[in-house]
Structure formats: C-alpha cells, structure tokens
Image: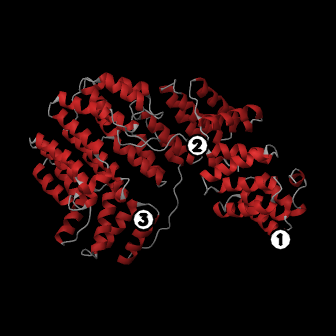
C-alpha cells in the first residue's frame, strides 16, 4: 500500500563516514576514512545540531529506587534495556561496591565503563579482574591504550600479548604490536610482524588483507621509505574496495608523490555522500603534508581493525573501541562520526547530534555529517530543520544534485509537494538521474495530480532498477486503487512482495489488488497476514474490515473499523471509518470490482 514510511527519506544512504580537521589532521581523515560505511552525515557548526538536539525526543525512563545493592543491580539492567549506558555504568559501579569479587558483575561493570569511554576506570577494573584471575576478552585493551598514551612501548607489547590470548582481540593486538615495534626502532620487524598476520589461518576468514597492506604502506611512509610506500599504495589501488577505503588510500598516495593516482582513485570510488570538489582540493593540500604521527597511525589502525571486526561476533564492541580511539586522540572526528552512526542505530539521537555537531562542515566529512543530521531531524519529524541543514550543505556545494534530491525527500515527508517537486527537478537538471530520484519524483507528481508525468517517472525508476520494491508497490497499488491495469498491477505487487516478504504494506497492497480483481477470498488471506505484520496501521486494518464486510463477516468488519479509528492519525480518516460503522462499505468501493 502507499505508505510514505515505506519509501524512506534518504534511501541512497546506508551509513556514515568519518572526519575531523584542521589542515594538519586531513592526513588522518584520509587514513581512517577507508573503513567507514556509506551513508549518513552531519552539520554546519553547532547551530543546526543545537536545534535538532533541543527537540529530539528521548523516551522517559522510570527512576527506580536504588538504596540496596540489589536495587542498584536491577537499575543497571533496566538502564541497559533502555540503551542508557551512562546510567547503567553508574549503577553497576554502585553494585560493585558491595560485591567487589563477583566475577560476572566485574565483567559487566568493566564493559559498561569501557563502552561509555571511561578508559582509565575500565583499565583499573581490568587490573582488578587480572588480580582475581578472572579471564575475559577485552580486559587488557584499556590498559593498552593508557600505555600507548604514555609512550611505554615495552608495556604495550606485553599487554598486546595478553590481548592476543583472546580471539576477539587478536587482530587488533597484532596491529598495535606491529606499530609498537616501529616505535622502538624496529621498523622492518614491525612490517614483517604485520604482514605475517595474513597467513594466520584462524583469522583468514576476517579478510584483513587490504588493511594489513595499507598499514604496511603507512609504516613504510613513517620510516621515510617513500618509494616503498608509493609502491605498496599503487598495488592496493588495483584492489576492489569501498569508496571510503579509496579515500584512505588516496591520502597515502597523495603524500608520496602519486597525486594523479590518488585523484583517479577518488573519482572512481567516491560515492554521492561526499563533496568531491572539497575532497580533490584537500588531496592537493595533502600532497604537501608530512606523514601522520605514529599515534595517529595507531588510532587509524584501532578504528580500521575494529570496523573489520564489526562483521563478526564481537561487532558489538565497536563502540567501546571507538571510545578507545577518542581517548587517544580526543580531537579526531573520525571516531565521533562513527560513534554517531552507532548512536543513530540505537536511537540515542541527542548523543549522535553532539558528535555530529562537532564536525567541520568544510572538511572531507562535512557533507556526510550534514546529511546525517538532516536524517536525524527527519526521523524526529523536524522536516523544516532537516531542509535547513540541507540548504546549508547546498550553499557549500551548490552543484551537487544529490543534495537537492535529499532536500526533495525532506519536503515530500513534510507533504510540501510543490517544494519537493522543485528540488527533485533541480536534482534531475543537474544530472542526478537515479531510480530513487525518479521514483520519489513520481510519488510527488502523483500527489500533485500530475498523473501522466508521475507514471512516466515511476516507469523510468523501474527501467533503471526493476527490483525497486517501493516503486513496484507504489505503481501497482496506485493502479489497483483506481481499478486500472489490474493484471499488470498484481504482477508488480507480487514482485514487490517477493523482494520484501516481511513488509506488511506490500502484502496489504497484494491483498487489496486481489480484492479489486474480485477475488475476496484470496484477498482476505493476504490482508490478515498484513495486519499481523503491521498491526498498528489504520489503513491496513481498515482494508481488512472492508473485505470482511464484502464477505458477509459483518461483526468482524465492524471490529476492524473500530480498531482502525483508534489507530488513525487524522480526523478525516477516523470519519471515514465512522461512516462505515453507520452505513457499511460504500457501494463505490464495490461497484468497480472485477467479476
């Protein structure tokens, strides 16, 4: 069925991308950038962020009484349930005061402190567990960070040996130890130690090869081996990689005399989230920069290998390790953006806004960060705020049609279809011609009753992407609702359901088109399934009531219409169902059915 929520609001975006910079830190951004995901983004200075933060809603949590140790423990568990790591960490600490040798409690308290970014406290808890012979993964990581901060490289190497005893930390431990060897003047040994990790059969499934080679090149650069760094970098440039990995590598190439190769790599691999003009200008500056510091390279490695681990069972530790990176380089915006990405996933929007608002809007990660802030505003139904943030992004990068597409999405979600159409058409004129653009423009034009042009764009969307389930469903439902092209409509919706079988909206569309085709018995099966998938949707519930009425199941129909009234958002929709309760299903809903 036609539901705006099924269309999404920034459907070209799948995840964030990192950055923080004054000019001296641009090198760092290019290094870490490789690991980021494709998608969100942030803000201009602090003003948009402050505005979003001011009205971002957070669930109100009950405040438990916690006078006892048991009360503290239960409060800690409740806070975890609500993703309130800060409160949970505090309550676990209170519980630990009376249970200082409880192994499970120590582990839980350690992880919440680590996750919260309280590295010094987490390190102390790690030492306490070690003294009690309590073994746990990750317990040596905070202490390792403190040793790195103190430049105590011998301690770092001892601690990484402890880290490597636990499989989830083994690759990260190897990367840190390799850089520690470089720090102690054993550069060749560090590179050898790192590259031998490729042959570790236990870790082979994690596919660390690209990042091992990248850090081997960074080590060569740090050691002054410019030709070797360039050679390794050029070899990597031929490897398939994400756009963000390409940015990481491009910084290395630019600094080591291969600016043209860096520009080519970026031009080929950059996705639409980034301001390519800014990136290319920064690459030219990067060619004049010195290599990153050893600490920055280590921080890059922590982020890189933590993201690598995200796809495996210990992926939930990503936030803790990003906090570790922030502890070592507080001004590094890469962990900030990645943390915001994770916070968006858990709907802790105020924390995400804090991180995104600190990102330089004119740097390589400025545009992705601004897109992320606009997404948060959209998610909280602050559509004007989202549009304002995107307008600021357009001011910085006025030739980017993708930004106009996102602006159109915000206006469409706000039901401002005229502005939405204008933004989409501007995007199209600038050369941004994608299936998502044509689909969303088609939706907007249909809402403006420009039906022929709307159909043209929806069909263009399907020509460009025949598996666009949203376009398939929208066009199929539209035709079915108007009683035209019914055979083709059902084929379109069946394909949408095949692509997304758990979408209650698509299953509803399939049921409704069967009803329009005169097959109420088949329709009711799909509509009952749709209400199970989307039990809180008034229109789906109302559709099931309509078909029940047509089948003579009058009491069930009235029950569904009453339920639909309680679920409806608008008075007009409620009035529609009240009218059905008084007079039944209108003849207009039945007369057009196929025999």
Say if mark 2 contacts mark 3, CB within 8 Å. no
Label 1 vs 2, first from the N-terminus? 2
| Quadrant of the frame with the C terminus | bottom right
Label 1 vs 3, first from the N-terminus? 3
Marks 2 and 3, Cα distance to the nearest angstrom? 29 Å
Q: Secondary structure at mark 3?
A: helix
Task: Give neighbour class at mark 1: few <14, some 14-19, many 20+ (Cα, 10 Å).
Answer: few
Q: What residue did someone put label 1 on? A: 555
Marks 1 and 3, Cα distance to the nearest angstrom? 44 Å
Indicate which label's residue lies in the foreground, 2 or 3: 2
Residue 410 % position (x, y)? 60, 39
Q: Is residue 565 visible?
A: no
| Residue at image location 68% in from the left, 36% down from the top | 459
Q: Quadrant of residue 385?
A: top right
Q: What residue did someone put label 2 on? A: 9
| Count of numbered labels shown in the rendering | 3
Label 2 vs 3, first from the N-terminus? 2
Q: Secondary structure at mark 1?
A: helix
Residue 268 % position (x, y)? 41, 29
Q: Which mark is residue 111?
A: none
| Residue at image location 43% in from the left, 40% down from the top | 357
Residue 103 % position (x, y)? 27, 74
Q: Is residue 224 left or right of residue 444?
A: left
Image position of 304 with respect to 463: above or below:
below
Say if mark 1 contacts mark 3, CB within 8 Å. no
Q: Nearer the viewer, residue 304 or 85?
A: 304
Say if mark 1 contacts mark 2, CB within 8 Å. no
Q: What residue did someone put label 3 on? A: 80
């Amino acid at each position: 069925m036609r539901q705006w929520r099924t269309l999404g609001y920034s459907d070209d975006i799948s995840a964030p991308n990192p950055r923080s910079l004054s000019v001296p830190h641009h090198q760092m951004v290019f290094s870490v950038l490789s690991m980021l995901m494709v998608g969100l983004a942030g803000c201009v200075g602090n003003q948009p962020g402050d505005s979003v933060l001011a009205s971002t809603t957070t669930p109100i949590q009950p405040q438990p009484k916690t006078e006892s140790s048991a009360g503290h423990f239960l409060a800690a568990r409740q806070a975890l349930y609500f993703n309130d790591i800060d409160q949970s960490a505090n309550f676990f600490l209170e519980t630990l005061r009376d249970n200082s040798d409880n192994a499970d409690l120590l582990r839980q308290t350690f992880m919440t402190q680590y996750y919260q970014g309280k590295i010094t406290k987490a390190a102390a808890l790690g030492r306490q567990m070690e003294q009690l012979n309590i073994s746990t993964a990750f317990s040596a990581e905070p202490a390792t960070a403190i040793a790195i901060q103190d430049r105590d490289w011998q301690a770092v190497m001892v601690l990484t040996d402890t880290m490597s005893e636990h499989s989830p930390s083994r690759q990260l431990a190897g990367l840190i130890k390799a850089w520690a060897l470089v720090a102690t003047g054993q550069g060749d040994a560090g590179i050898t130690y790192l590259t031998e990790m490729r042959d570790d059969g236990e870790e082979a499934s994690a596919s660390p090869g690209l990042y091992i080679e990248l850090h081997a090149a960074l080590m060569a650069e740090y050691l002054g081996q410019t030709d070797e760094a360039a050679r390794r970098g050029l070899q990597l440039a031929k490897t398939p990689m994400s756009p963000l990995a390409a940015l990481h590598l491009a910084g290395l190439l630019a600094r080591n005399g291969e600016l043209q190769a860096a520009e080519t790599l970026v031009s080929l691999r950059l996705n639409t989230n980034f301001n390519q003009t800014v990136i290319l200008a920064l690459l030219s500056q990067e060619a004049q920069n010195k290599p990153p510091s050893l600490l920055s390279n280590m921080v890059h490695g922590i982020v890189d290998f933590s993201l690598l681990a995200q796809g495996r069972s210990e992926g939930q530790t990503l936030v803790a390790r990003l906090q570790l990176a922030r502890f070592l380089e507080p001004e590094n915006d890469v962990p900030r953006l990645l943390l915001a990405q994770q916070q968006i996933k858990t709907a802790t929007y105020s924390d995400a806004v804090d991180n995104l608002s600190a990102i330089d809007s004119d740097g390589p990660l400025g545009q992705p960060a601004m897109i992320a802030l606009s997404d948060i505003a959209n998610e909280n139904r602050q559509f004007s705020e989202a549009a304002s943030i995107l307008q600021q992004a357009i001011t910085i990068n006025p030739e980017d049609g993708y930004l106009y597409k996102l602006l159109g999405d915000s206006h469409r979600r706000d039901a401002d279809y005229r502005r939405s159409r204008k933004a989409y058409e501007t995007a199209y004129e600038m050369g941004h011609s994608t299936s998502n653009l044509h689909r969303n423009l088609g939706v907007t034009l249909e809402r403006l009753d420009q039906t022929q042009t709307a159909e043209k764009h929806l069909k263009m969307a399907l020509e460009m992407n025949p598996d666009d389930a949203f376009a398939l469903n929208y066009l199929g439902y539209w035709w079915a609702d108007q009683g035209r092209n019914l055979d083709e409509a059902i084929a379109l919706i069946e394909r949408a359901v095949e692509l997304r079988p758990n979408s209650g909206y698509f299953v509803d569309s399939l049921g409704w088109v069967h009803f329009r085709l005169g097959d109420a018995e088949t329709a009711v099966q799909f509509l009952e399934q749709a209400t199970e998938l989307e039990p809180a949707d008034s229109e789906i519930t109302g559709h099931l009531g309509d078909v029940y009425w047509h089948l003579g199941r009058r009491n069930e129909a009235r029950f569904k219409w009453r339920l639909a009234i309680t679920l409806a958002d608008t008075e007009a929709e409620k009035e529609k169902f009240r009218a059905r309760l008084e007079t039944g299903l209108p003849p207009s809903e039945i007369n057009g059915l196929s025999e």
